[in-house]
Amino acid sequence: PVAGGGVRIYNSSPSLEDLIVTDNMISSEFPASGGGMYLYNAHPIVTDTVIKDTVTTLKYGGANNGIGVYMNQSDPVFTRVEIVNNTSTEGGKGAGVYMVDSSPVFNDVRIAENFADDSGAGVFMDSSTPVFNRVTIEDNVSNTTGGGIYMSDSDADLNWIRVQGNTAVEQ
């Protein structure tokens, strides 16, 4: 599948600071992931970063997951990061953040104004153990369930979290 329109990190552990990852696009005939940032078996430290305005388009259908940030088998640390205004179409999940088999840490993060055609517009997690410290998840819209957060088979640690103004719309 096509992945990492803005940044792709595979089997690596970089430190990323003061990034603006914006206006990225993945256009594909098949499913695509991580339009802003794609992480696979990755352990980056991401600080003072904005990931925004990413969109995907598919020619033949499928699902676009994790349009802002996609992670699989990864343990990133995000500090003072904004993940905003990312759009997942074609049945996509986790327009802001999509995680599977991952253990990320989010400190002082804002996940807002993301749109998912399927579940978890703000955050979608499956089989993951994330830690959220002082995180705001707001004004995200899902066309099915979990406008703010969708959690399946996961064990999340939520500390000082604000989840507000999110919407799940039945289509």
Image (cartoon, grey):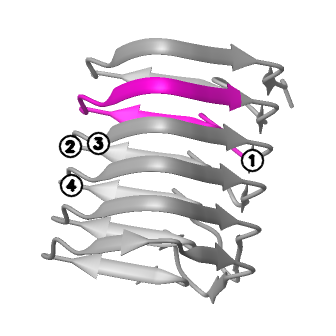
**What is the spatial separation of the Cα atoms under label 2 and label 1, in whole angstroms?**
22 Å
Q: Which residue is mark 3?
A: 104
Query: In the rendered structure, which amino acid carries the disc numbered 3?
Result: Pro
The mark closer to the camera, 3 or 1, is 3
Q: Position of residue 60 (x, y in %)?
A: 65, 79
Query: In the rendered structure, which amino acid carries the disc numbered 2?
Result: Asp
Please give the range of residues in magenta.
117-137
Relative to 90, does residue 125 appear above or below in the rendering? Answer: above
Q: Are marks 3 and 4 in contact (CB under 8 Å)?
A: yes
Relative to 148, does residue 65 appear above or below in the rendering? Answer: below
How packed mark 2 is, by other alpha carbons closer than 10 Å (few <14, some 14-19, many 20 or more), is some
Label 2 vs 1, first from the N-terminus:
2
Label 3 vs 1, first from the N-terminus:
3
Q: Are marks 3 and 1 in contact (CB under 8 Å)?
A: no
Q: Which residue is mark 2?
A: 101
**What is the spatial separation of the Cα atoms under label 3 and label 1, in whole angstroms?**
19 Å
Q: Position of residue 38 (x, y in %)?
A: 40, 70
